[in-house]
Structures are given as C-alpha cells and as structure tokens.
Amino acid sequence: MKSTSIAFLVLLARAACWGADSTASLFQQGVEAYRAGDYVRASTDFHKAAARRPASGTLQNFGNAQWQQGETGRAILAWEQALWLDPFNRSARGNLRFARRTAQLDAPDLAWYEVVSSWLPVNSWAWIAGLSFWLAIAMTMLPSIFRWRKAAWQQAGAALGLAIFLLSVPAHLGVDCRSRIGFVLQKETSLRLTPTDEAQVITRLPSGEPGRFERMRGRFVLIRTGRSLGWVQQDEFGLTCPNN
Amino acid sequence: MSLMLSQPRIDVESPVVPEVSFDPPVVRPGQESIYRVAFNALDESIAWPDKIPAPPALSVQPGGHAQMLSLGGPTPVFLPRTGFNYHVRASGTGQFTIPAFTVNVYGKAVTVPAAQLLVETTPTNGPALPQQLGLEVAQANLFVGQAVWVTVTCPGFPAPLLQGTTPVQLMGSGFIIDQSAFRQRHEARPRFLTGGQGVVLVFETFLTPIASGKLTVFAQGFIGARPPGPLIITGPSFSSAAQPQYTLLDSDPLNLTVRPLPAEGRLPGFTGAVGAYGIDSPEISTNQGRVGEPLKLTVRVRGEGDLARLVAPPPPKTREWQILPATPDNMPPQFIQLQGFTTLQFTLIPLSDHVRGTPPIPFSSFNPDRAAYEDLTIPSVPVTVQSGSIPADLQVLLHANAADADEEKEPVLSGLAATPGLVAGSLVPLQRQIWYPLVQLAPGAAFLALWGWDRRRRFPQEHSDILLRKRARRALRREWRALQKAARTGDSARFASASVSAMRVACAPHFPAEPRALVGSDVLALLPETERSGRTGQVVRRFFTAADDSRFAPAPSQSLQILELKPELEQVLHELEARL
C-alpha cells in the first residue's frame, strides 16, 4: 500500500515536470521561430504554451508574433492579458502604447477602482484579502483563546489586517469589472443593432477597439464601446478573462 | 472649367471594332503565345467576361489589361483603346481556336472574332517570339521598405513610341512605385533569335515593397510603332495615316520575397530608411552664436537606396536647444539619385549660453545586406554661444521644451521576453475559482474549532456548581457501589461508612462544603420536614451513629441490623441524587 502511494506520487511529480518541460520547450521553439521570421509558427507555439500555463512573458511574445502578422486586435488582447497577470511587465505596457499609437486606438476607460486593481497582479488581491481578513480575525481571537496578555501590537495587527481587507474590496470590484473588458479581434467588425445576421449595422469597429461585455445571446455578444452599444459575433470579440 | 471644355472630346461614337490576334500565331509545343484582344472603346464600357471560351487543351493565364487615349482623327479627338492580354500555351501540336464570343460594349453586343493558334513541332517560318516587355529586378529577396531598381525593356520595335507620361505600369499589390524616379534610355542589346544588335527602350524606376510575403509584379504598357513611309502634313490638321498602331504589351510576372524588418536591434531615430547609407561630417553655419540666434546644421546622407524618399530623423527635445524639423532636399528626385546623396538641414536655436555643442541627433537605417540596423547618429558639432536676450516667443519655446524633455520616449515594439515570466494557473482570477472559497473555509473552520475548544474549556470555570454536582453524582455512584459491595459481604462497619460517605457527597454541593465536613444534621436539613422527623430521619441518624461507632468506639459493635436498613438507605440516596 505504502509503495503504491509512493509510486503514485512519483508518477504525479513526473507528470507535473513533463508539463513544465513541455511548456518551456514550446516557449523556446516560439522564440526561435520568431527570430527566424516565422511568425505563424511562433504564434502557434506561444499560444499553445500560454494555453497550458498562462504566463506574462509568453503572452507578451504571443502579442508580438500576432502584431508581426498584422493581427492588431489579437496582439492588443494578448498584451492586455500579459498585464492582467503581471502589471509590472513594462515591455507589454510599452507595446500596448506603441500599438495604440500606431493603430490610432484608445485604451479602455477605467474607473478609479479598476485603476486600483491594475496596480498589482490580478491574483494577488485574492491573497491579500484572504490573508488580511484572517490576520484580523486571528489577532482578535487568538489572545483571548490562548489567554495571552493583551498587547498593543495585537490590536495594531488586527486593525492593520482589517484596514488592508477593507482597502482591497474596491480592487476586487475592479478585478471583476476589468474581467469584462475585451477587444475587437477582426478588422471592420460590424456592430449590430440586434443579435442577428441580418441586423442593421450601427458602425464598424476597428481591430483592437476596447469594449465591455454585457451579455450573450446565441453566438452574439452585447458589448458597450466608448461610443455605442451593440452586438458583435462571439468570435470577433476576445475577453481579457476568457471564461466569463 | 474653360480648360476642361477646351479639351478634345473622347470618341465614344465610332463603331466598336475588336481586334484579335495570337502573337506569334505559330508556336512550338510548350512555347508561349499571347492572345490579344483590343477595342477602340473605353475600359469602363466593356463588360469583359471573367473567363474566355478557350479550348481545354490550351493553358490560359490572364496578363495585362489597360486603357489608353491617343489624340487623332480629322478633328482632334481622344481615341480610346483598351487591351486584354492572355498568355497561352499548348503542350501538344495542332490547330487551336478560341471561338468567337460576344461582349457588351456601350450596352451593345459586340462579337469578338475567333482566333487560331497553330502549334507545330517545326514552324514553317522559323521560330518566333511574342512581342513582350522584359522585366528585371536587381534583387528578388527584399526587406519591407527596401527600394530596388526595376528595369523594363521594350524590345522588337525599330522606333518605339510611348503613350502618356508614365510609359509603363508595374502591376501588382504590396509595393509602391516612385513615378518621379522614372528614367528611360535607348540601349543596343543583342537580338535573341535573329542575332545582331537591336535598339531597345529601357525604363528604370524604384520599387519599394510595403508588405511582407510573396509579391508578384508584372509590367504592361501600350507601345506603338509609326507606319513606315514619309509623313507630309499640308495643313493644320491631323493625318490619320500618321497615327501609330498601339499594342498592349506585358511582361512575364516576377516573384519577389519580402521579409519584414526585425523588431530586435532597432536603433533610435529609425524613420524607415532601408539601404546602405552613410553620413558625411555635419557642417554648421557658424561656430559662434548668440542665445536665440538660429544656426543651420547641414548633413549629407549618401548611399544606395531611395535617397529622394529618405525621411529625416525627428529633432530631439532638449532643454537647451530648440530644434526645428529638418527641411528636405529641394532637388528633383532624379538629380538626387544621380548625385548620390541628399542633404538634410536642421535649424537649431540655442536657448542657453551654457551649451558647448549641438546635441547629437539620433538617426539610424536598416542595412538589408547585413540584415541589421546601423547607427547614423548625427554627431555633436562644437559651438560657442554667447549670452543674449531671449525674445518673448523663444521664452515660450524654452518652457515648452523643458516640459517636452520630460515626456516619455516614443514607444517602440519591444523584443521578446526571454522567460515566460509570472505564471498563473489560469487567466480567471482566484476569487472566481471554485477552490478559493473552499480554501477560505479552512482557516474559518480552524478558528471555529479553537473557539469551541476554548468555550468548552471555560464552561466548568464559569459554572462551578454544575461541576460540583457532576462530581458529586460520580462520587455518589462510587460510594453506592462500595456500600453494595459491603452489604454483599456483610461488612456492616464498612457498609455504614460507605453509606455515610454516599450521603455526604450527595449533600456537599448544596452547601457547598467538603463532604467529610458534613454531619447528619446537614443531611437531614436537605430532607423535607416530614421525612426529617420520621422514619427517614431515623435511618440517617442510625447510619451516622453506626459510622461514628465503627470509627471512634474502642470496641465497635458488629451489628448486622444496619444492613437491614439498606432499602431505606437507597430510598434516601435516590432522593438525594434527584436533588443534585
């Protein structure tokens, strides 16, 4: 029984290592293809690597490969996703500025709590909120449970934890709202009045135009852009957080 | 408007006569012949079919398609001419006919007559080649933005005539042609079939690819030849006899492979200059200046490339200089290309007397031969600036410059990330994943367990009477078992002692007191008044007396009567237990 468990754990560890090696190999292949000017191959490799293990650098490189192929919308989406995971990625931020300046596109308008949420990696807010909340609870409960002598540092710790937790609440709201931001992927995408193929076209959106996901109906998505509200086909709009 | 009205009209009223021919009409198997159709009509008026009715044995590839206007007629009018070329090959011998077919021209049906191509292994009149333009390019593997000379040759006409200001067109997509750089010359070249030298007309221009990938380009143009014989004009009129016969010629398509410029290694000041460039030492109008006085900085850029289209680098922003964008070279493009250099002239205005030289102006180009960017930064030139009063308008510039200098740099596409960077399990944030609330429940459960444990621990301390009663019940049961054991063995002394102990422990929590400190009256005090003075009281007293007797008497009596009181004792103990 014991040997079976150990064998199972070894197998699990090897599977995890193989997955990491495979992703690293794909990343390296993508880099080599990009340097050789084979941007289609580089895109495929970076896309596969990002699908297996989303990483800021992989998404940045995927955006570069897409940009080299003239896929402005997909490049901007990839760089936004790179920043979504790691807002300290200066290259991805610079690429977004470069792309938007080149393609004459606007960045999404962010509310103050969305700006706050973009200061740190998206997953860090969850850890901060969890740790600060339980720190406040621990600092409040543990002295009394273990009959420690009341001390100022315990109260300061509880206050600090509670304050951090309360301050992270707007960031959580911002993360939730930002996860609904997406980008038009195709050039001259039709923004329709109704979710039908025969619908009246309100306007044509350029590739890379930002929009906010409102709801879905069939294979159409209702989005709100800076100027209008309308429906686009699902495959013409990519969300920063794709599982919305 | 008057200029427009003074122009000759376009002849759209003459009957439309299509001309059809194979050039040459007799070829060997696999040799190319050109099927030409020409109309004396405007291109827009011809509803030309997408596919011509060629026999399946003929391989047909579309070629040139163009329109021209030539001045002619008794009263000067523009005569339209539209041509369609197809490159035709037959792998086998025989006579192939493209049958007559109907085309709508000016809304009327016009029949294009049939044309025949004879394919023979050995043509009777010897080998013949079609009238074609030649297309040559200096290099077929290019980078985006790399200008390359394209040469179009027009052989076979003893006296070729050109139509329009741009005699030939280069057709295709993904590139631009510098019309201003067109140059032409006559050249003697060997004739391919007949031998000897023949005069050909050579056109040269720059082609600049603007898209990467595989590009296809071909040349086309109307080339005319004046009919032989003397031309005598006796009055102020046009002679139709002098009109040359224009034929649409085209070239075989040429494939170009175009690579994008690499993002890596891009240097500051790159404005799209692709070619082998170099700069001469910059020259400044004067090395002695005053604050606010403009200086001219001139620099020559030499090299192989489209010098006429070279874009000067943007002027850098500094606190101490106001630099105006460079003025382009005013020379015609052809002269710039001939002289082999272009001149960039910057105007610099010193805003401070602290400067000791002009600021370096970042500039770079991409060298396609080395496939690398090259630094062409215009170096600093020493100057001495004396103090002076800065005009009010320059004061404004000074402040603007100070602000601009702090602006962030022009963004450029970054290189690749060397490592995957910060990794996440998913793009979906943690708080949206199902396991996150479950993980948050773990410390919650731990704290709840701690709280429960603490509460349980504190309960006896906060409710000592319950604890005493609980202990008393436990002790009562223990003594009860002892007295029963004594009763079974007939040990009356031990029975009495255990009975008293049982009554004491059952009564102790009510006072509260140490059980051993209680006496019979304390037990009786807990019994109702009626029982206290009745039989129950007597039983309690007997037991206490017997216990005292067995403990303190010099010779304890072994009375077995006390054992007979067991049922009454148990009744008392039950009553006391019920009160706990």
Image: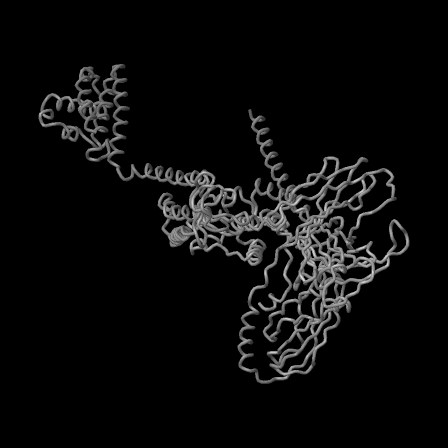
Give the quarter of the figure containing the N terminus of chain B: bottom right
Camera-nearest residue between B83 and B256? B83
Colour treatment of the image: one colour
Q: Quadrant of residue B279?
A: bottom right
Q: Is residue A38 left or right of residue B530?
A: right
Residue A172 coordinates in the image, percent (x, y) = 43, 49
Q: Residue furthest right?
A: B196
B184 in relation to A131, above or below? below
Camera-nearest residue between B519 and B342? B342
Q: Is residue A236 left or right of residue B379?
A: left
Q: Quadrant of residue B554?
A: top left
Give the quarter of the figure containing the C terminus of chain B: top left
In this rendering, does residue B389 appear at all? yes
Residue B535 coordinates in the image, percent (x, y) = 11, 21
Going 11% across and 26% down the picture, which residue do you hit?
B532
Residue B116 coordinates in the image, percent (x, y) = 77, 40
Residue B508 coordinates in the image, percent (x, y) = 22, 32
Tally of marks = 0
